[in-house]
Every structure is written in structure tokens, then in C-alpha cells.
Amino acid sequence: MNKQIYQERKIKMMGGLTDIPGVLVGNAEDKGGRTGCTVILCPSGAVPGVDVSGGSPGTQNTDFLRAGTAEYPVYGLLLTGGSFFGLPATGGVMRWITEQRIAEVPLVPAAVIFDLPYAQGSPPPDAALAYAACQAANGGPLAEGNVGAGAGATIGKIYGRPMKGGLGTASLHIPGGPVVAALAVVNALGDIWDQGRIVVGALRPDGDFVNQTQALLHNVPSPLFFTSTTIAVVATTARLTKAEANRVARLADDGMARSISPNHTQWDGDTIFCLALGQHTSNLSSDALITQVGTAAATVLEQAIIRGALAAQSGGCTP
């Protein structure tokens, strides 16, 4: 059933993060396919923003993305498994960027997911794996599901048995305006919701969904808390300042709220990056443009999360 839903969702909203000109995406997994990393490259640079909303974030270089800091472009981002052990993998992205003579001292923000239980002892992503992801990066259609940083992702970990999580992406073109796209690595503690129903989440022994939100509200005993997170990138061809990109990242968070419940718990490290790479303004004022792009970002992020969760179910992997 989930595979059928994914195919329907795939038809409704095609496209992905590489629909933004100047964005390249590459994935790499360990030999066992139990963990991995995803690299987003912007060789011509991008204006960055960030929103960190989870209670247990695992990030690097996010302070440099906030409004009021130096106006320094971002040339690459790393989304990776391995929890905090995966953060040093940014060295591989920095090496690739400097070898390509894109920047002498590149800023590479990063965010991690906690996939150690599923990795089952596999070494965390390192600089070599991130470098391989850079070498694989391209502007073509993106694989979804159990790939890259989504290789070790799982969903639904408060009560019941988790289901597989994964990587998803989506995009839309605002008529007469900018393109807005998102990529998400879905490793949520909560359940994934689509149009008012759970489509991926914690399972009872009989295979039905637990509905973890209701379980929490009814004080169901013996929760099985595990550290989790959903990390994402939204990108646009709109012309944004750094402060505006930060605001768009914050507005995109509505997409997480609509598709994940419970969301932003103390065991989630939810983080959203924003990358602005264009000159579209839609002839709007700054406030109107931010609202338009932020609303679109929330929409595509919601779809990317749902697509990543559903695509993982058709990938043949089990937690």
C-alpha cells in the first residue's frame, strides 16, 4: 500500500532540489548500505540561512549562517549519518571544493542524523565517503529512499517498532516567479502524516500504526525514546539576503509540522538549511517575496518528507 501511495505522490509532484540551477547533489553509502552521506554543492555560491528547531541538534558551522554574521557564500552542505561521529566528514567536502579551486577556505555547514542503531557497527561516514559523494554530485534527477544520508534512517521510535526512513525531494515553480525545492533526510522520532493519516511510523505487533501522538496524550507507559532527527535543505532561484534566507528557513518549518507528529521533540535534532541562488523577485516587496517563497518552501518540504518516507518502504530494507 505504501508503495502505491509513493507512486501516486511521485506523479503529483515531480522534480527535486536539482531543479534549482547551480545546485548539484551527490550521495554515497557505506559498503553495507547501513549509513551514508548526501552532499549539496553550489559551485557558484549561495546565500545561506538556517533554522534549528529540534531539541537534540547535531550541527556544524550553523552560527555562521545566521543573520548579522559576515556575508560569506556557501559552496557546499553536508547531510550525514553517524551522529556526531559523522561531522568530521565535512573535510572531504572542503577538500573537493578547494581542489576544484572554487574557494580557498570553504565554509561547509553540516547536520547529522542519529542512525547508529541501524548502522549496526558500520563505521560512520568519513571524509573519504563525503569526497566520493562530491565526485558523484550532478544536476540530474535524484534517487529517493534508502540512499545517501537516508541509508540508515528510521521513523517512529517513541512506541512500537520503527519503519525505514529515507531521502526525499520535491520542487515547484511559482507561475511567473522563482523555483523552490527541498530535499529531506527523514529520520523522525514521530510518525509521517499525509492528508490526515499516518503513512509511515511506529507499528504495533499486529502491523497497525500506533499513532504516537495519541499514545503520548494518553500516557501510554514504557516509551522507547531514541535520538532522531529530520534534516533538510530548501533552495530557491529567488533573490534573498542572508536575513531573508534565514526567515525562509523558519517558514519552511511549517512543512515539517504538517508531515511529522510529534515534531521537534527533545530527541529530534531537526535542522533546515536555506540556499538562495537566483535573482527572481516576482516584482514583489521584500516582505511579500519572503512570504511567497517561505510558503512554497513549506509545501515542497512537506512533500519531500512524505516522498522520502514512502520511497524508503519500496527500497526493500527493514530496520
Image (tube, helix red, strand yellow):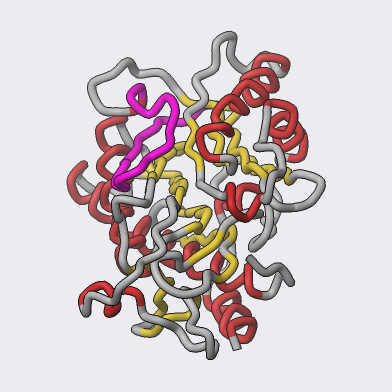
Residue visible at 41% across and 78% down in the picture: 194
Q: Is any part of residue 48 visible from this angle?
A: yes
Residue 18 appears anywhere in the view: no
Quadrant for the N terminus in the image? bottom right
Whole-percent x, y for residue 43 in the image = 60, 28
Count every numbered label the image shows and give the total. 0
In the image, is residue 102 above or below residue 297? above
Magenta stretch in the rendered image = 45-64
Looking at the image, residue 226 sits to the left or right of residue 24; the answer is: left
Q: Position of residue 247 (x, y in %)?
A: 25, 42
Q: Residue at x 51, y 47 (%)?
A: 114
Residue 244 or residue 4, whichever sits in front: 4
Residue sitting at 59 percent across and 40 percent down? 82
In the image, 211: left or right of 232?
left
Residue 302 is a magenta residue: no
Q: Residue 195: horizontal and vertical position, in percent? A: 37, 82
